[in-house]
Image (spheres, rainbow, N blue to C red):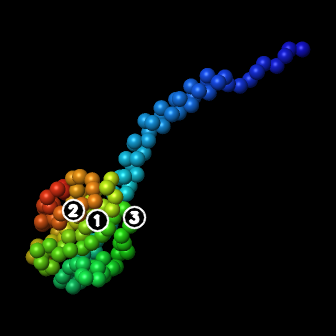
């Protein structure tokens, strides 16, 4: 009667597999972390874009823009459900004067994220919008766009 052979892995084979998994994890981790940052920044882009569209609608209905007041109810008046989050603080402020334009901002509340600013400006009976991204990561407030074609200093137009 033949005797049974040992079926299994040696300690060396197990160590090689663990080392390979560790190397693959080390390669994939930075890519994964970059994707989570992009997803968080996507929140701000989406919300500032929604604020721009809501400001345009509000302007067509009321012939003025909504801006932050002492009680900070501007975003609530837009009725779009944008609220401050763990990643961003949102605001709407007048540019030049309230009839000229409004800047909608997402200030990063995390030093690893970029801030965003959108703007809606009047041009005779039409409105034009812009969306800008800060050039650097950080919690500094993004500059307001100066008009529908120019972002403020330290930021770039993304659409």
Marking on residue 86 = 3
Disc 2: which residue: 142
Relative to 60, 125 lies left or right:
left
Closer to viewer: mark 1 or mark 3: 3
Residue depicted at x 30% and y 61%: 108
Q: In the picture, which quadrant includes the N terminus?
A: top right
Relative to 65, 71 lies left or right:
right
Residue depicted at x 42% and y 45%: 32
Q: Nearer the viewer, residue 46 or 30?
A: 30
- Mark 1 vs mark 3, CA separation in Å: 12 Å
* Comes first in the chain, label 2 or label 3: 3
Residue depicted at x 37% and y 52%: 37
- Asked if the residues shown at circle 1 and circle 2 are in contact, with their CB atoms under 8 angstroms apart, the answer is yes
Disc 1: which residue: 106
* Comes first in the chain, label 1 or label 3: 3
Q: In the picture, which quadrant includes the C terminus?
A: bottom left
The percent coordinates of residue 44 (x first, y second) are 32, 62
* Comes first in the chain, label 1 or label 2: 1
Residue 71 figure quarter: bottom left
- Mark 1 vs mark 2, CA separation in Å: 8 Å
- Asked if the residues shown at circle 2 and circle 3 are in contact, with their CB atoms under 8 angstroms apart, the answer is no
Is the residue marked by circle 1 packed among few (<14), some (14-19), or many (20+) residues within 10 Å?
many
Residue 17 figure quarter: top right
Is the residue marked by circle 2 packed among few (<14), some (14-19), or many (20+) residues within 10 Å?
many
């Amino acid at each position: 009667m033949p005797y049974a052979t040992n079926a299994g892995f040696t300690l060396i084979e197990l160590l090689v597999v663990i080392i390979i998994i560790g190397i693959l994890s080390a390669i994939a981790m930075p890519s994964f972390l970059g994707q989570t940052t992009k997803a968080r920044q996507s929140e701000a882009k989406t919300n500032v874009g929604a604020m721009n569209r809501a400001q345009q609608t509000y302007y067509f209905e009321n012939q003025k823009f909504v801006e932050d007041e002492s009680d900070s109810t501007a975003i609530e008046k837009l009725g779009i459900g944008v609220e401050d989050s763990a990643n961003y603080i949102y605001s709407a402020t007048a540019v030049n004067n309230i009839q000229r334009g409004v800047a909608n901002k997402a200030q990063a509340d995390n030093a690893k994220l970029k801030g965003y600013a959108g703007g809606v400006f009047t041009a005779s009976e039409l409105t034009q919008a812009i969306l800008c991204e800060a050039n650097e990561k950080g919690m500094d407030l993004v500059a307001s766009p100066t008009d529908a074609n120019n972002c403020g200093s330290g930021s770039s137009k993304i659409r």
